[in-house]
Structures are given as structure tokens and as C-alpha cells.
Image (tube, grey):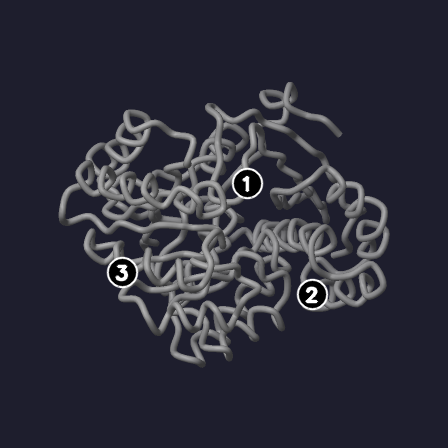
């Protein structure tokens, strides 16, 4: 079954409120969608990134994979990765590869008329999620409403907020927001924080000690994820699990993080690292080193593959991406109770609402 030439489309969706984390602010999110057809079936994949990802996919990857076998995903993936040698794998190229690879897995399972989770093999019928948002731009009332909705409304027993405001210059407010979050969610729910690499090493250790007083169990990117030595130093000094990996654009970069002993739980993003093909490889490597993994953002892109992992901790139920995926796809999953069930329908179970979302299309 030969692949037809893949098609990319780009959509930009304004946020529902101003958003920022420790090191970046934004007011919209751009979604790059890839559709690829073989026979009578079409697979859909996506990534989050600049519109240039769609340009790269159309110009460089689509002609390359046209005519290849829809069932031989390893061969297609390898051809894509080899082709970007001179362009550079990290960043735009890897996001484009990721979107197309996710579409290929969706296509293959649709050709075989199987749920993608069943094609890969299910380890977890129910996949745990954690609510993720709590942007530094939120005032206390907004933060409380979001956390309350997850923990007390949808009964998701784990949530994450952003800290590290202003590149680590607002520690007092960071800790105030952590205290406020704990008061809202109560003593039983798990509380996570994400600093997006805003702190220095010693500063992160000091903050980590304060976080322990509020039962924070997850300290994401306390220092830059490029600083593997710093991550290891913080990991050794604090009680919370230190996590990172969302900027791993290929298997070797994630392998370096694992072998450096930099994290307690490896985050992997299939929309950046090279799709589900590389996501599964990275998870297996982490498992060999005794680490759990957590899927970063784009929850519906990860759900089926996450269900196959013996070392899965959870997937991130990210506010921006959940909002967009609910808008763009029929078949979106329900996290009520703190888990999702990604075994319904065929493929990844989602269908793009092309007409309904046309107003957001920019390319």
C-alpha cells in the first residue's frame, strides 16, 4: 500500500487569557497538521510549532515519502531522519518528522481497522493524566478556578503550575502561588511545579527545599534542560523528583539526559522527538535504566502509545493543547477521574473538524 504525498496545514489559535511561564510569554498557539493517505484511509498527525514546520514538511519530507509503503513505518522514519542531515535534526525538522510519523501510525492502524492502542499492544487500559496550566500570568482567583476544576470538578488527583517567574526574579511570588495552589487542591492531591529552566543551580536548590514544605513531588526543569550537570546536582539535593526532556529532539539527546543521571522521570514529547516511533524507543531506553516516563503536552497524540508502556507514569493534560484538541477533533478523550481510555474507534480515534476550524487556518 503506497503512500500518497502528505499534505500539511497550519492553524493559529489565540489563548483564552494571557499566558507565560518562567522564561517565555505568548498569546497564541500554532498547530501544524499533517494528513497522509494510502488506499481509502487517511492518517492525521500534528505538532505545535511555527508555520515554517509546515513549509519544511511540504517541501522536504512529503516528496521523499511519497510512494513508500504505508505499513513500513521504520523505513519511512529512517528515510526522513537521514534526509535532514544538512538541515539539522533538532527544531523545525524534527517537529515536521514528528507530525508525519504520528500520521503514519494513525494511517497504519486505520488500514488494519484497529485502534492504535491495540496495534501497539495495551499495557494500561486506563492512562493517568495530570492537569497542567497555572501560568504565571494568572491572578490567584484564576489559578484557583483552574485547579479547582481539575481536582474537585473532574477529580484529577494531580496538577502542575508554572513557577520561576521573570527568569527566577520573583521567588516570593512563586512560593506564594505554590501555597495558594496547595490550599485549593487540599492535602491529598499531588502538586507539581515547572520552572522552565528559570533558576540558577543554587537558587533551584533553595527553592526546592521550600517546595518540600508544601508537598511538591515534581520539580520540572529547575535549571535549563541543557545543563545536565546542574539537573543532576539539583536532583541530588532536593526531595522532589526532578524531571525534564521535553526539548529532546532525538533519541541521542534523550539518551544523554538518561545516562547523566539528570532526571527521576524522563519527559518525552512525540510531537518534537521524532513521532511515536522515537517516543517508543526513548521510553524503552528509559525503562532499561530504571526510569519512568511522562508524555509531554499534546495528550491526544500520546494517549495510544502511552497505554503500551510498562514504565509510564502519566501524560500531561495541558490546558492549551487540550483546549485546541477539543476544538479541532471529534473523539476527544474525557479525563474525569484522572485517567483516559485510548482504545476506542480506529487509529488514534480522532477526526479533524476541517470546516469548523477553518477560521484559524493561516497556511
Q: Nearer the viewer, residue 88 or 199?
A: 199
Asked where in the image residue 363 lies, by quadrant, the reply is: top right
Mark 1 vs mark 2, CA separation in Å = 39 Å
Asked where in the image residue 356 lies, by quadrant, the reply is: top right
Residue 118 appears anywhere in the view: no
Asked where in the image residue 1 lies, by quadrant, the reply is: bottom right
Pointer 2 or 3: first along the chain: 2
Mark 1 or 3, closer to the camera: 3
Residue 147 in percent (x, y) is at 28, 35
Mark 2 or 3, closer to the camera: 3
Q: In what element is the residue under mark 3?
A: helix
Label 1: few (<14), some (14–19) or many (≥20) C-alpha neighbours in 10 Å: few
Mark 1 or 2, closer to the camera: 1
Q: Nearer the viewer, residue 5 or 246?
A: 246
Label 2: few (<14), some (14–19) or many (≥20) C-alpha neighbours in 10 Å: some
Judging by the rendered image, the residue that carries numbered circle 3 is 209
What residue do we see at 53% from left, 61% from top?
225
| Residue 73 shown left or right of residue 106 in the figure | right
Judging by the rendered image, the residue that carries numbered circle 2 is 72
What residue do we see at 20% from left, 48% from top?
189
Judging by the rendered image, the residue that carries numbered circle 1 is 24
Amino acid at each position: 500500500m503506497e503512500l500518497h504525498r502528505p499534505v500539511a496545514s497550519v492553524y493559529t489559535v489565540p489563548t483564552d487569557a494571557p499566558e507565560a511561564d518562567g522564561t517565555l510569554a505568548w498569546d497564541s498557539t500554532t498547530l501544524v497538521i499533517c494528513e497522509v493517505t494510502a488506499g481509502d484511509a487517511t492518517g492525521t498527525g500534528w505538532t505545535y510549532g511555527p508555520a515554517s514546520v509546515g513549509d519544511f514538511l511540504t517541501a522536504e519530507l512529503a516528496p521523499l515519502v511519497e510512494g513508500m509503503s504505508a505499513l513500513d513505518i521504520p523505513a519511512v522514519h529512517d528515510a526522513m531522519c537521514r534526509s535532514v542531515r544538512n538541515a539539522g535534526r533538532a527544531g523545525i525538522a524534527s517537529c515536521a518528522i514528528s507530525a508525519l510519523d504520528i500520521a503514519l501510525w494513525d494511517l497504519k492502524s486505520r488500514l488494519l481497522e484497529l485502534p492504535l492502542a491495540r496495534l501497539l499492544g495495551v499495557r494500561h487500559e486506563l492512562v493517568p493524566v495530570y492537569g497542567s496550566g497555572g501560568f504565571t500570568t494568572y491572578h490567584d482567583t484564576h489559578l484557583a478556578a483552574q485547579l479547582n476544576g481539575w481536582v474537585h470538578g473532574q477529580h484529577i488527583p494531580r496538577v502542575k503550575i508554572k513557577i520561576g517567574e521573570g527568569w527566577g526574579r520573583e521567588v516570593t511570588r512563586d512560593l506564594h502561588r505554590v501555597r495558594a495552589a496547595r490550599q485549593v487542591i487540599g492535602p491529598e492531591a499531588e502538586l507539581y511545579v515547572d520552572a522552565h529552566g528559570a533558576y540558577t543551580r543554587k537558587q533551584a536548590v533553595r527553592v526546592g527545599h521550600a517546595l518540600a514544605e508544601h508537598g511538591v513531588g515534581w520539580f520540572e526543569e529547575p535549571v535549563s534542560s541543557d545543563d545536565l550537570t546542574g539537573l543532576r546536582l539539583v536532583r541530588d539535593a532536593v526531595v522532589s523528583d526532578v524531571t525534564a526532556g521535553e526539548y529532546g529532539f532525538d533519541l541521542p539527546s534523550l539518551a544523554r539526559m538518561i545516562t547523566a543521571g539528570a532526571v527521576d522521570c524522563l519527559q518525552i514529547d512525540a510531537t518534537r522527538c521524532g513521532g511515536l516511533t522515537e517516543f517508543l524507543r526513548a521510553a524503552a531506553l528509559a525503562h532499561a535504566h530504571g526510569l519512568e516516563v511522562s508524555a509531554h503536552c499534546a495528550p491526544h497524540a500520546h494517549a495510544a502509545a502511552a497505554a503500551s508502556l510498562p514504565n509510564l507514569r502519566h501524560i500531561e493534560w495541558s490546558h492549551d493543547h487540550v483546549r485546541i484538541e477539543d476544538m479541532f477533533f471529534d473523539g476527544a478523550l474525557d479525563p474525569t477521574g484522572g485517567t483516559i481510555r485510548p482504545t476506542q474507534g480506529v487509529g488514534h480515534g480522532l477526526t479533524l473538524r476541517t470546516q469548523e476550524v477553518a477560521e484559524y487556518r493561516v497556511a
